[in-house]
Amino acid sequence: MYLTTARVARILGINKRTLHNWIKAGKIPGPNANPDNGYLQWTMADVEVVRNVLMEEPK
């Protein structure tokens, strides 16, 4: 099952635009995109990767 970017943003407590900006800036790895519609296909493993990257970041 895939999660939407909006759902991932809610899980992480951030705005979905922030997720897109972080991917674009190379701050976090982006998930695979659906080849049919281009939507990002997030998994819980992707969410954990983002959490780990954010936890490693200096405050």
Image: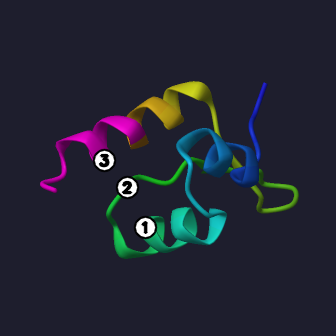
Instruction: Give the residue displayed 59% in from the left and 26% down from the top.
Output: 44
Secondary structure at badge 2 equals loop
N-terminal label among 3 and 1: 1
Element at label 3: helix
Looking at this view, name the residue that lies furthest to the left. Answer: 58
Give the amino acid type for the residue marked by disc 2 in the picture: Ile
Label 1: few (<14), some or many (≥20) within 10 Å?
some
Query: Which residue is labeled 1 in the image?
Result: 22
| Quarter of the C terminus within the rendering | bottom left
The three-letter amino acid code for the residue at tag 3 is: Leu
Q: Which residue is mark 3?
A: 54
- Magenta highlight on residue 36: no
Q: Earlier in the sequence, mark 3 or mark 2?
A: 2
Residue at 32% x, 63% y: name it: 27
**Which quadrant of the figure contains the N terminus?**
top right
* Disc 3/disc 2 C-alpha distance (Å): 8 Å
Above-or-below relation of 53 to 27: above
Q: Residue at x 73, y 44 (%)?
A: 7
Mark toward the viewer: 3 or 2: 3
Side of 16 where 55 appears, left or right:
left
Which mark, residue 28?
A: 2
Confirm or deny contact between disc 1 and disc 2 (CB under 8 A): yes
